[in-house]
Image (tube, helix red, strand yellow):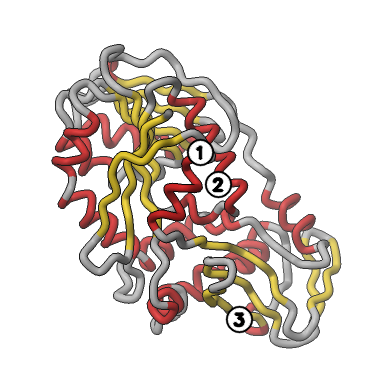
């Protein structure tokens, strides 16, 4: 049962980008694109959970292993009475590892744009950690917003941004995002962030082209979502999933490719797809540890610690604001 004095929900009424407008605008461009945030409808979210269990997809299990192995060191860095602020909190799963290790955490603040998902996840976590005040904030965390008053004035404000989601931002946008996070944390703030490392391209390409075809289904579900929600008549069988590592840019690039010249109606508008034409759906940037520390420095963060797994597949960084 939730203690009402230890749970609060603040709705800052974020306006989510309209799926219809994003699709119509994105497919009307010379270089077609659909933002990756639209992957996560109900089926897409389920497929992503399946991806995280695939043998080829190392990031989730590797980051969890790092957090478990070094949770004591991380807790020592944070110290007692810390306020943990997680942007894009989703299901609030990885943060549980930290909350079990922290010394009397003063608050956990999950921030997410998905209102009902946030409410459900925050309620579940508050039930499982009754001694930790949970202050959920519904906001677009990629834009400036103000946190509500938080308990535990003596403890640090520590940002938590796991999952290498930072890799979905192009580098300049990643710096801007981190600078926004710095403003939210305020003077003396610190940050714990998961970052996927550069590695053998074969490992990277296997992670995004699994043999079971789950990642392909996840990517193509965008087209199925268009058919379901926007009265589309896309022939899914005439499109294919494409993912490859671009070493010059240091990123995995993900596309949907048309396998023939074809036309489709979407929300009453007709679109042409050339044979071989690509629809960009996601970038996933990879960084050497030193590269990411340099990027974070542009947003005002000073490196404190970096933890990696034995295979150096993934990294977790601890930063302090200058």
- Residue 105: % across, % down: 22, 25
* Residue 287 visible within the image: yes
Q: Earlier in the sequence, mark 3 or mark 1?
A: 1
Distance Cα–Cα, label 1 vs label 2: 6 Å
Front residue of 98/154: it is 154
Marks 2 and 3, the one that precedes in the sequence? 2
Q: Which residue bears the numbered disc 1?
A: 178
Q: Residue at x 41, y 44 (%)?
A: 90
Residue under the point 19% across and 31% down: 129
Question: Do the CB atoms of the residues marked 1 and 2 lie less than 8 Å apart?
Answer: yes
In terms of image quadrants, where is residue 31? bottom right
Q: For the residues carrying marks 3 and 1, which lies nearer the camera in this image? A: 1
Residue at 53% in and 66% down: 251
Q: Residue 260 versus residue 83: which sits nearer the camera?
A: 83
Toward which corner of the image does residue 312 lie, by quadrant?
Answer: bottom left
Looking at the image, residue 151 lies above or below residue 302? above
* Residues at marks 2 and 3, CA–CA distance in whole angstroms: 29 Å
Query: Residue at left 18%, top 47%?
Result: 70
Which residue is denoted by mark 2 in the rendering? 174
Q: Alpha-carbon neighbours of circle 1 within 10 Å: few (<14), some, or many (≥20)?
A: many
Which label number is shown at residue 240? 3
Query: Residue 97's mark?
Result: none
**Which SS class for mark 1?**
helix
Asked whether disc 3 touches disc 1, contact meaning CB atoms under 8 Å apart, the reply is no
Residue 169 pos. (x, y %): 56, 52
Q: From the viewer's side, name the closer residue of 98 and 201.
A: 201
> Answer yes or no: do the residues labelled 2 and 3 have beta carbons within 8 Å?
no
Q: Position of residue 271 (x, y in %)?
A: 83, 70
């Amino acid at each position: 049962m939730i203690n009402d004095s230890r749970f609060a929900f603040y709705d800052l009424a974020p306006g989510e980008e309209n799926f219809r407008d994003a699709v119509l605008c994105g497919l009307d461009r010379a270089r077609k694109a659909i933002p990756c945030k639209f992957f996560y409808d109900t089926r897409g979210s389920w497929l992503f959970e399946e991806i995280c269990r695939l043998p080829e997809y190392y990031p989730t299990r590797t980051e969890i292993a790092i957090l478990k192995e070094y949770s004591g060191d991380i807790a020592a860095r944070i110290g007692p009475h810390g306020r943990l602020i997680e942007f894009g909190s989703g299901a609030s799963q990885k943060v549980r590892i930290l909350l079990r290790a922290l010394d009397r955490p003063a608050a956990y603040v999950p921030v997410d744009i998905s209102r009902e998902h946030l409410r459900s996840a925050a309620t579940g976590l508050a039930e499982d950690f009754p001694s930790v005040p949970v202050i959920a904030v519904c906001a677009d965390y990629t834009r400036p917003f103000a946190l509500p008053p938080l308990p535990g004035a003596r403890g640090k404000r520590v940002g938590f941004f796991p999952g290498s989601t930072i890799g979905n931002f192009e580098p300049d946008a990643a710096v801007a995002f981190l600078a926004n996070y710095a403003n939210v944390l305020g003077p003396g703030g610190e940050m714990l962030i998961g970052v996927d490392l550069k590695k053998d391209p074969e490992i990277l390409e296997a992670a995004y082209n699994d043999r079971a075809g789950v990642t392909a289904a996840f990517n193509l579900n965008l087209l199925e979502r268009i058919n379901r929600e926007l009265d589309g008549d896309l022939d899914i069988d005439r499109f294919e999933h494409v993912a490859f590592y671009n070493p010059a840019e240091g990123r995995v690039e993900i596309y949907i490719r048309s396998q023939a010249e074809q036309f489709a109606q979407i929300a009453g508008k007709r679109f042409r797809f050339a044979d071989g034409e690509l629809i960009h759906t996601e970038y996933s940037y990879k960084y050497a540890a030193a590269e990411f520390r340099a990027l974070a420095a542009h947003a005002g963060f000073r490196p404190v610690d970096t933890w990696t797994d034995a295979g150096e597949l993934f990294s977790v960084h601890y930063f302090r604001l200058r």
